[in-house]
Image (cartoon, grey):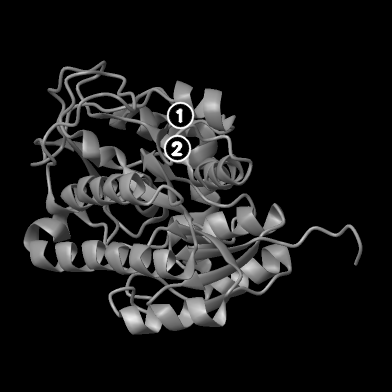
Amino acid sequence: MMGQKTKQKILVTGGCGYIGSHTIIELLENGYDVISVDNLVNSDENVLKTIKKITGQRVKNYRTNLCNKSSLRQIFEKNADIAGVIHFAALKSVNESVQKPVLYFQNNMLGLLNLVETMLEFGVNDLIFSSSCSVYGESKVLPVTETTPLEPPQCPYARTKVMGEEILSDVCFTHQNFRAVVLRYFNPAGAHPSATMGENPRNVASNLVPVITETAIGKRNSMTVFGSDYDTRDGSCVRDYIHVMDLAAAHVKALQFLSENKNTSNFELFNLGIGSGVTVLEAIFAFEKTTGQKLNYQIGPRRAGDVPAVFADKSKSTKILGWEPKFGIEEIMESAWAWEKTRSQG
């Protein structure tokens, strides 16, 4: 039709996962065409049915492991109109990465290398890379900015994110047409406002918010706050929690930033966090206040590998991407609780 703008097709790796699925909704609602690649090792393809219910649009998923380069190439051959890639697919358990470092380096690094090599081969030049605040390690500076020096990674998972950023920086230096935006997430939490989609870990949940909701609904008898003697407001660890829909919106902003050629470099870094820290106890109190549910929790000893505090300076994301989080800790807890009730009925 005359004057109708062609939809940009975006390939989302890890599209059936927690952040990937919420980002697909945001992409569809902003006029993008989407295909997913997910080998379903930590996710469930049924989430695509939920996406269709919410958006009215069906998304095709290719059950392909990015470590299989020939299968990945076939996806690019079948979809010659891919305009950009959002790369979520990676193993991401801190504890598992300590137990299985070879698996994490093999999966996360080979998957990224195959993806970038295939993008270069097919002339797909825009990549949004899912990184993590874990790259900062035990930072001596708070809040952390994008220029804060990185301290040594605390686990192999974090090291794969540092290495991923370095690989992309080197690729961008050599291939000037290739553009990468690295998004360093803080702690994603919460669920879609429809309460039909949210964090649904296949393995035992270790993130604070699902642990809280699982305790409240009775899946766990109690929960433990690890450490009460940190140098923080109340002795518990400080983290920066970000609503998953705010995170999803940032990926759309990053794509628009590239398509409108607003980048001054072909390698850009952005922090994605609310920009203020919340202690573990404050998160618990926010849940109790928002939902009226009392939590059965106890104070335990510190947990190995936990840094006392980390939270973001988000001013660069706000200034350059025009991104501003809409939801705070209470909205995160409210949406997570609504989702917990939905998935527990299922």
Would residue 120 be seen by someone viewing this image from the given angle? Answer: yes
Instruction: Report which quarter residue 92 is drawn in.
Output: bottom left
Left/right of residue 290 with respect to residue 163 in the rendered view: right
Q: Is residue 44 left or right of residue 226?
A: right
**Front residue of 303 and 71:** 71
Q: Nearer the viewer, residue 102 or 49?
A: 102
Instruction: Provide residue 179's location: percent of width, then percent of height.
Output: 45, 48
Q: Amino acid at mark 2?
A: Ile
- x, y percentage for residue 190? 48, 46
Q: In this rendering, is residue 223 above or below 145?
A: below
User: Badge 2 local density, few (<14 within 10 Å), some, or many (20+)?
Assistant: many
Q: Earlier in the sequence, mark 2 or mark 1?
A: 2
Q: Residues within 10 Å of mark 1 (few under 14, many from 20)?
A: many
The residue that label 2 is drawn on is: 242
Q: Residue at x 14, y 31 (%)?
A: 151
Q: Quadrant of residue 235?
A: top left
**Is disc 1 placed on a helix, strand or loop?**
loop
Q: Secondary structure at mark 2?
A: strand
Q: Are marks 2 and 1 in contact (CB under 8 Å)?
A: yes
Q: Amino acid at mark 1?
A: Ile
Residue 274 — which label? 1
Gap in angstroms between the C-alphas marked 2 and 1: 6 Å
Residue 101 in the image, given as x and y percentages of width and height = 10, 61
Which quadrant of the rendered structure holds the N terminus?
bottom right
In the rendered image, the vertical position of residue 337 relative to residue 121, given as above or below: above
- 308 left or right of 4? left
Is 216 placed above or below 151 here?
Answer: below
Q: Residue at x 36, y 34 (%)?
A: 284
User: Which residue is painted at 89% across and 57% down in the image?
Assistant: 3
Could you say which is closer to the camera, residue 212 or residue 322?
322
Furthest-right residue in this view = 2
Determine the residue positioned at 22% across, 27% down: 236
